[in-house]
Amino acid sequence: MSTFDPGQSWLREFPPTAFAMVMATGIVSIAAHLTGYDVAGWILLGINAVAWPVLLAITLCRLLRYPRAVHADIVDHGRGPGFLTLVAATAVLGSQLSICHVLPQALPWLLGLAAGLWLVVAYTFLAAMTIGQRKPGLHAGLNGTWLLLVVATESIAVLATAVSPIHGASVPLDLLALAAWLLGGILYMMLITLIFYRWCFVPMRAADLTEPWWINMGAMAITTFAGSRLILATHNPAGWPGDGQLVLQILTTGCWAMATFWIPLLAALFIEKHVIIGDPVRYTVAEWSVVFPLGMYSAATYAYADAAHLPFLVNVARITVLIAFATWILAAIGLLRSALRSVNGK
């Protein structure tokens, strides 16, 4: 475990999860466009057009200037999964451009970059977890950020469904979308089993109920979104036979039901921690881990309503997108206040 001096630079301390802000902004923008709030969607696209390259430049500078700090982060059970926000943010930005019909020529490049980053980050992290000799127990080592493995994988599936029509229904891209969707679902089943075991059979305090646990819901929401996009494709994904659409619809319905299942429980635990116990909400990068799942649930519900021909669910999406946008505003205010305090020296 690494220890840093008190005088270390902000660049050395830069959090691996910083791209969660881009993920959250991107998906709220997508949900806003889908549900008819186009002005908000365009504003959020403009913010991401600045935020993504700036955060990418900072991340590359950190890698070059402080490679040991980056290494210490990626081999850490708690911080390592945070690097997957870079993968998901890149793919979400591509999906955001696709929904807004902006720069379609950039979509294949962003898909290629996201897939390449997934290979590097996911396998580096998992290899480090496997061969590392100092391993914490579930209580200390497992948190909601591990489900970023699912989110990053599903984000590639979503973007692949957008890129495939550009190339005239490319079979390799259809296969990539389908394989990533299924892989993400399998990874979720593996991880959520451990998470459910930890929640129900390992003692937890209010302090352990941190924001990244909202990814329990967000991971299923993006799986629902990807499955809905596969159903809505004008051609059979990867050449599935006719009943393939039925299989997709059944599995996607299960994913939407699972995402919905988490919301009352997570909301109740949030109220327990911050209202009943009285633990104040303080801004950290983790706050975006609440915004992203809420925005993703709205986008997923809208897409699922379209794919399953259930128009009444569109109203649910239109309500939840307002909640997601409100949480985005609160997180943005927290970010600005935190930045001002840093500039003013506290």
Image (cartoon, helix red, strand yellow):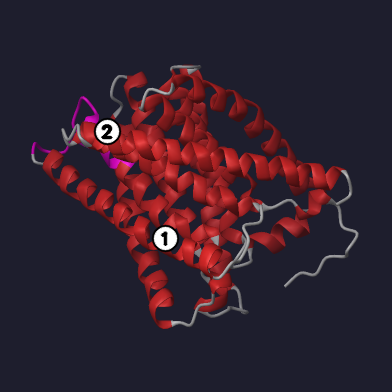
- Mark number displayed over residue 227: none
Q: Which residues are magenta?
A: 225-242
Q: Position of residue 121 (x, y in %)?
A: 56, 52
State how far apart marks 2 and 1 are (Cα): 22 Å
| Label 2 residue SS | helix
Q: Position of residue 214 (x, y in %)?
A: 46, 56
Q: Residue at x 30, y 58 (%)?
A: 261
Question: In this rendering, would 97 be left or right of 47?
Answer: left
Question: In this rendering, would 120 be left or right of 264?
Answer: right
Which quadrant of the figure has residue 278? bottom right
Compare residues 92 and 215 and report the one nearer the observer. 215
Of callouts 2 and 1, the N-terminal one: 1
Question: In this rendering, would 189 be left or right of 288?
Answer: left
Q: Amino acid at mark 1?
A: Leu
- Mark number displayed over residue 314: 2
Q: How many marks?
A: 2
How dense is the environment of label 2, judged by Cα within 10 Å: few (below 14), some, or many (20 and up)?
A: many
Compare residues 68 and 229 and report the one nearer the observer. 229
Per the image, the residue denoted by label 1 is: 266
Which quadrant of the figure has residue 159? top left
* Image quarter (top left, top right, bottom left or bottom right) of the N terminus: bottom right
Q: Is residue 236 above or below residue 339?
A: above
Compare residues 337 and 240 and report the one nearer the observer. 337
Q: Looking at the image, can residue 204 be seen?
A: yes
Q: Residue at x 70, y 60 (%)?
A: 71
Which quadrant of the figure has residue 51? top right
Confirm whether the magenta stretch covers residue 6: no
Confirm whether the magenta stretch covers residue 226: yes
Q: Amino acid at mark 2?
A: Val
Compare residues 71 and 276 and report the one nearer the observer. 276
